[in-house]
Image (spheres, rainbow, N blue to C red):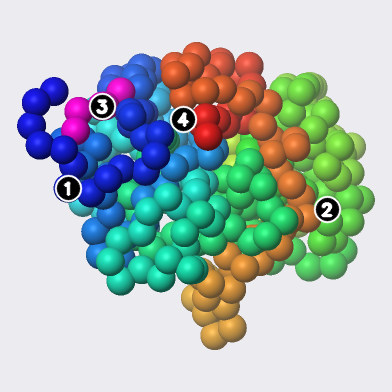
Amino acid sequence: QGGPPPPHPLPKGVLERQQLMFVDTKRVEVSREGDWRVLASLVPGPGQLLLESASSVVSTGTELKVFRGNFDEGAQLDTCFENMQDATMAFPLAYGYSLVGRVVRVGPAVDEQVWMHRLVFAFAPHGTHTLVSAQSAMLVPDGISAEDACFLPAVETALSLVQDARPTVGETVAVFGQGMIGLLVTAILSASFGSEKIIAVEPNCDRAAVSRRIGAGRVIDPRQPQAFASAEAPDVSIEVSGSASALQAALDHTGRGGRIVLGSWYSGASSGLSLGLAFHRSQLSIKCSQVSQLPADLTARWDKSRRFAEAWRWLRRLRPSTFLTTASLPLSRAQEGYEMLDAGHTLGLQFTYLP
C-alpha cells in the first residue's frame, strides 16, 4: 500500500471502511476498503461531516425491492436525497437512507461546537463511515436512541400517509399490510383516534400479533373465507403491502364513496386488477401518497421541517425499535439479513456497528 499518507490524520481507530453494495438480484456484498487513497476520501470538505455509524435500518419497501431486482433499470435512483440524485438504478448499487452515526470530524465552515461528537441522522447508505452534508444531516434530539432514530424516514412516511388519508372522528380506517410502514400507520392512527375504528389486514400471524399489541382494534386475515363479511366497510383504506391482491381487496371492500390511499409501488404487478362494473359504481377516490412532498393543501401551514419535528415527537412516543426490529446483525452478515427479510422470516432488520 504505497503512496503518501492521507492529507489529514484520520479519526483514531479508523483502519477500514465497510460499505454495503447491491451487486446483483438477491445478492449483496460488503466491501472492505483500507487503502490510504480510500481512507483519505473520508476527509470532509467544506460544509461536510464525517460520521462513524452507530446503527442503520433496512427499508422493507423500496430497499427490499432493490434486493429483489424489482426496479426499472436506468431510472433515477432517488430525487429526494442529494447523494443519490445523479445515480441511476443499476447494479452494482449502494442504497439505503436510514443511518445514524456520531460526528467524528467536520469540514471547513462547519461549527464544531454544534456538530462534533453529536449523534446525527443521515439519509445515507449502509456503511461504517460516511460523508454527509451538514445541511442535510439532522441532530438526534436528546432522549432518542440511535436504534430508534434510524426509523425517522419510516415514521415520516407513516405520518404522510395519515395526512393524505385525512380520517375524521368516527370513520373506520383499514390498513392493508402490517410491515414496517403499516405497523407505524396503525400505531399512529390508534393513538390519535382510538383502537375501535382501526382495522389491520395482514395474513402473517406474527405481524398480526404485533398489530394487536400496538393498538389495532381488529385484525383480519384476508386468506380466510368471508374475512371481511362481519367487518364494517372502511371509510378509508391505506394500502402499504405492495401486493396487487391487497390492493384488489382494498378496492373490493372499501365502502361506497370511500377513499383509498396507496403508499406502495407495484413494479408492474397490478396488471391483473379487476376494475369492472362494481368498481365503476363504487365512486371510490384513489390517491397516491409519496413522502417526498407535502400535500398541496397543507403547505400553507406545514413544511418538511414541521413534519420532521412531528416525526421526532412520534419516535420518542412509539420507540419503534422495540416492536419493529426483530433482527439486529453486524454489516458483515448483510446477505443473511436480506434473505431473512425476503423470506418473511423477520419483520425488521437493523445493522449494528462496533464503536
Residue 41 on image: x %, y %: 21, 43
Q: 10 Å neighbourhood of mark 2: few (<14), some, or many (≥20)?
A: many
* Residue beneath disc 4: 64
Please report the bounds of the magenta region as a residue range.
Answer: 32-36
Residue for point 64% across, 61% down? 141
Few, some or many residues within 10 Å of mark 1 (<14, 14–19, 20+): few
Badge 1 element:
loop
> Callout 2, which amino acid?
Ser
Any magenta on residue 35?
Answer: yes
Residue tagged by mark 1? 7
Q: Nearer the viewer, mark 3 or mark 1?
A: 1
Kind of residue indicated by mark 4: Leu
Check if residue 23 falls in the magenta segment.
Answer: no
Dot 4 lies on which element?
A: helix
Instruction: Identify whether 84 is placed above or below 142.
Output: above
> Distance from label 2 to label 4 (Cα)?
27 Å
Residue topped by disc 2: 190
Mark 1–mark 4 distance (CA, rounded to whole Å): 38 Å
Q: Give the residue pinned by disc 3.
A: 34
Looking at the image, tell me whether mark 2 or mark 1 is earlier in sequence order.
1
Provide residue 140's location: percent of width, then percent of height: 59, 58
Amino acid type assigned to the residue bearing label 3 in the image: Gly
The image quadrant where one finds the N terminus is: top left
Q: Residue furthest left?
A: 3
The CA span between labels 4 and 3 is 29 Å
Judge the density around disc 4: few (<14), some (14-19), many (≥20) Cα neighbours within 10 Å.
some
- SS at mark 2? helix
Give the CA distance from mark 2 to mark 3.
49 Å
